[in-house]
Image (cartoon, rainbow, N blue to C red):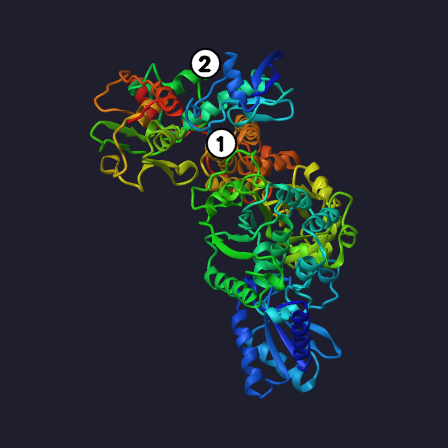
């Protein structure tokens, strides 16, 4: 693939044609927060944290193709302010109480907020009345902690192939739903593989029996499975 | 059916129509039906039948005549005499109209709406040239006014490239709001690799109060079908979809009507296989949405047609490259299609002669609000807003002062009285922070509160947000809350600055046009009516200049002053 050269934060960097801006940025270890992006899953472009400034306009790096000669900034004051505001909106949208959460200390939402320096929320906390679904024998879905990143939807559809999770409702009433609105424990498509739990960035999806700050997640399995599929490693 | 058959059908229908001494055209478009046009139509028919005048008089159900706020409307055509238009027709009056015109050969004195009013003569009908003048459902009536001749010309005399060039030369730009050059879009789809391609007519029309596209489809449906077939020939598609918004009240009858019209065209060889005896085939099907404003966005619309969750996806790739089922797709607004037949028939140069340098042709507006005659109008680009409000609209009722005009619906902005001489032009209006949009036009007087208006549109956007991206999903809700505080008396200067800052975020970082344009009504009213926002503030004058908002709440920080005395003393006891 053709090599391309572009400028990021005043530095000339090289990439390959066909790469997204985010891939080039990550290849060069330039800091850029993301949440709905997960290596191995399709790009969504929904959280808008990875917005970068191309001079003419602001674009989401994960869904923008890197092109020869682009001049990109990831660190303008405007972008920093926007990232803070986006996180404030997320924290105010649902009920994120770190103090009682199984993912306290390992949560990606927490980590991103800390990294961009969001330490208070200036918008009204909406405090929606959201349920928990503990019907599954091994896992729990707490909608209060969900940020609608749809990593669970994508991993279940693209990697496991069951498509148990999808989104119902619209706008603020969007809701991660199993099958056609079934309690998770009664889902007919769920294979209990647990991939959704491992890729969920917050404490929304977690193992049963976890207490505060006890949940640990790893999503390196994505690399193994997808790499293996790609290279045709399995003949059974 | 071929060109010769078309000519014969046209002639036969014209002769049939001329055989009547008197034709009573009754507007049966939705706004008129809502005020009783159905009963009026029945009375016209019954009266003619009872008196034995069925051979001399024809009662015809037509589409929209324009002055919707004056409905029900009846237009009488008589041989050798000018047409007469009656407004606010009741069934009783309808009986009198028939009697007078047939027996006395003279119009009635009352309920006349003169056809030489500025409302009519300042308009320029191109898209709606047949609307209100022909039977809505009759193929013969459409053919009699030249229908399907443009399609015949295209199939026999022009190559697909030439058709695209003609549309490009006309300067036609997308009428859905974005104003993208139509000819260029057709070219892009035409140049896409050959194979299965699609044509989509976007009839989602989600703006509150907008009914231009609906009216065209109700009043002159064959015009849309003919244009889609021409487009299909031009880009190499053999399948078209008309995407209609779900959730229209009482739309079943209309959809059945559209279905009947399509099937009748097919039966006559004007659609379907071997159109007009040529080797070109084009099939049109209707697809219904489920009532979401976001389906007006083209990628969401296509997902909806494919039966999936309607959420926009980032572009590129654009539909011209990869649309329905990954195939090259041409998607245009219904009104854009409404311009195609006149361009082919009369030539691109003719069309380009109307309008301004960059905005050619005409625009259909749904003019509502504080005007003396509200309804559907079609004006040449380049006409001033002053002419629209004061001449066509007839001015503001009770001679109240004109305050502003809102265009572009929830994605648009307000143009204040100071700029009333602005002309209808894509760039001119964008320069003022508004846009032509899809055609919604709300005229406001001094009794309208601009902050309340911004709040109304923000509530709409927050409700219609698809939920995919954070700024639109959560941002519009927070913007709404801030606007609610400002309009209920508890807003502070800090809320105003938070409002402005959040508008910037939503506008710059939203994934699709819904979110990107949602702050426009707020930003536009802040630009021209900032003092009105400031007047509402708790730490300002705490009043609504228009006298509309109920200012009865206090900011939360002020609650300590209104807490009951009992709780305050408990602190001292402890």
Image vertical order of residue A59 relative to residue B191, above or below: above
Image vertical order of residue A102 relative to residue A132, above or below: above
The picture places residue A10, in percent across and down from the top left corner, at 63, 12
Residue bearing the label numbered 2: A115
Which of the pair B106/B289 is nearer the observer?
B289
Give the left or right position of residue A18, taking residue B87 as reference. left
Q: Secondary structure at mark 2?
A: helix
Q: Which chain letter matches label 1?
A: B
The picture places residue A207, in percent across and down from the top left corner, at 25, 23
Task: Please rate how many residues cluster around mark 2, counting C-alpha atoms within 10 Å: few if below 14, some from 14 to 19, many from 20.
Answer: few
Q: Are marks 2 and 1 in contact (CB under 8 Å)?
A: no
* Residue positioned 54% across, 53% down in the render: B239
**Quarter of the image that includes the N terminus of chain A:** top right
Which of the pair B192/A206 is nearer the observer?
B192
Give the left or right position of residue A125, taking residue A130 as reference. right
Front label number (2 vs 1): 2
Which of the pair B543/A163 is nearer the observer?
A163
The picture places residue B254, in percent across and down from the top left corner, at 50, 62
The picture places residue B528, in percent across and down from the top left corner, at 66, 36
Give the left or right position of residue B42, taking residue B124 as reference. left
What number is the disc on residue B475? 1
Q: Is residue B508 visible?
A: yes
- Cα separation between marks 2 and 1: 22 Å
Q: Secondary structure at mark 1?
A: helix
Number of numbered discs = 2
Image vertical order of residue A153 relative to residue B105, above or below: above
């Amino acid at each position: 693939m053709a090599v391309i050269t572009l400028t990021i934060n005043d530095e000339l960097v090289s990439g390959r044609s066909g790469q997204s801006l985010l891939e080039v940025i990550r290849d060069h270890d330039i800091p850029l927060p993301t949440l709905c992006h997960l290596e191995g899953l399709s790009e969504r472009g929904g959280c808008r944290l990875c917005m970068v400034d191309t001079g003419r306009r602001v674009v989401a790096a994960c869904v923008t193709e890197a092109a020869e000669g682009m001049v990109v900034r990831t660190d303008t004051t405007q972008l920093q302010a926007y990232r803070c505001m986006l996180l404030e909106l997320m924290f105010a949208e649902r009920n994120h109480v770190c103090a009682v959460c199984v993912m306290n200390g390992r949560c990606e939402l927490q980590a991103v907020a800390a990294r961009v320096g969001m330490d208070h929320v200036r918008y009204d906390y909406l405090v929606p009345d959201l349920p928990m679904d503990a019907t599954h024998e091994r896992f729990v879905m707490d909608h209060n902690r969900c940020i609608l990143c749809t990593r669970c939807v994508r991993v279940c559809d693209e990697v496991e192939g069951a498509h148990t999770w999808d989104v119902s409702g619209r706008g603020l009433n969007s809701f991660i739903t199993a099958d056609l609105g079934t309690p998770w424990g009664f889902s007919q498509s769920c294979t209990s593989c647990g991939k959704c739990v491992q890729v969920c960035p917050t404490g929304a999806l977690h193992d049963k029996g976890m207490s505060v700050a006890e949940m640990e997640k790893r999503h390196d399995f994505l690399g193994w499975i997808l790499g293996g599929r790609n290279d045709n490693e399995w003949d059974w | 059916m071929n060109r010769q058959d078309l000519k014969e059908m046209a002639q036969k229908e014209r002769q049939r129509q001329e055989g009547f001494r008197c034709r009573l055209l009754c507007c049966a478009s939705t706004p008129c039906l809502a005020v009783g046009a159905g009963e009026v139509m029945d009375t016209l028919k019954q009266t003619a039948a009872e008196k034995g005048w069925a051979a001399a008089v024809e009662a015809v159900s037509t589409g929209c005549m324009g002055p919707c706020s004056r409905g029900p409307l009846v237009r009488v055509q008589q041989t050798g005499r000018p047409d007469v238009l009656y407004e606010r027709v009741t069934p009783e009056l309808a009986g009198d109209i028939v009697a007078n015109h047939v027996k006395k050969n003279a119009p009635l004195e009352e309920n006349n709406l003169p056809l030489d009013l500025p409302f009519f003569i300042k308009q320029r009908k191109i898209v709606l040239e047949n609307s209100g003048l022909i039977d809505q459902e009759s193929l013969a009536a459409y053919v009699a006014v030249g229908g399907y001749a443009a399609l015949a010309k295209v199939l026999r005399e022009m190559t697909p490239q030439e058709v695209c060039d003609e549309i490009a030369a006309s300067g036609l730009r997308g009428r859905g709001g974005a104003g993208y050059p139509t000819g260029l879009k057709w070219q892009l789809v035409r140049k896409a690799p050959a194979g299965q391609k699609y044509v989509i007519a976007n009839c989602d029309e989600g703006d509150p109060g907008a009914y231009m596209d609906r009216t065209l489809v109700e009043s002159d449906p064959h015009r849309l079908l003919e244009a889609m077939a021409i487009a299909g020939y031009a880009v190499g598609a053999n399948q078209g979809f008309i995407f209609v918004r779900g959730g229209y009240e009482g739309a079943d009858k209309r959809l059945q009507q559209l279905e009947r019209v399509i099937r009748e065209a097919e039966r006559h060889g004007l659609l379907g296989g071997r159109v007009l005896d040529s080797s070109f085939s084009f099939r049109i099907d209707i697809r219904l949405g489920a009532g979401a404003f976001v389906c007006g966005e083209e990628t969401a619309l296509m997902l909806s047609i494919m039966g999936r969750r309607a959420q926009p996806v980032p572009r590129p790739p654009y539909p011209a490259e990869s649309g329905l089922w990954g195939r090259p797709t041409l998607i245009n607004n219904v009104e854009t299609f409404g311009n195609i037949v006149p361009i082919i028939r009369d030539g691109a140069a003719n069309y380009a002669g109307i309008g301004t340098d960059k905005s050619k042709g005409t625009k259909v507006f749904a003019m509502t609000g504080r005007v003396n005659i509200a309804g559907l109008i079609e004006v040449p680009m380049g006409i001033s807003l002053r002419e629209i409000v004061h001449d066509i609209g007839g001015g503001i009722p009770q001679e109240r002062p004109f305050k502003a005009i809102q265009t572009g619906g929830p994605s648009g902005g307000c143009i204040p009285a100071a700029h009333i001489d602005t002309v209808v032009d894509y760039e001119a209006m964008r320069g003022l922070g508004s846009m032509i949009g899809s055609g919604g036009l709300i005229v406001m007087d001094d009794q309208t509160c601009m902050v309340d208006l911004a709040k109304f549109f923000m509530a709409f956007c927050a409700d219609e947000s698809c939920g995919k991206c954070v700024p639109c999903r959560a941002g519009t809700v927070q913007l709404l809350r801030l606007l609610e505080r400002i309009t209920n008396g508890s807003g502070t200067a800090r809320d105003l600055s938070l409002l402005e800052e959040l508008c910037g975020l939503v506008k710059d970082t939203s994934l699709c046009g819904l979110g990107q344009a949602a702050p426009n009504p707020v930003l536009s009213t802040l630009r021209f009516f900032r003092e009105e926002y400031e007047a509402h503030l708790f730490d300002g004058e705490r009043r609504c200049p228009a006298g509309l908002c109920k200012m009865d709440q206090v900011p939360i920080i002020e609650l300590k002053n209104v807490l009951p005395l009992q709780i305050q003393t408990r602190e001292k006891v402890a």
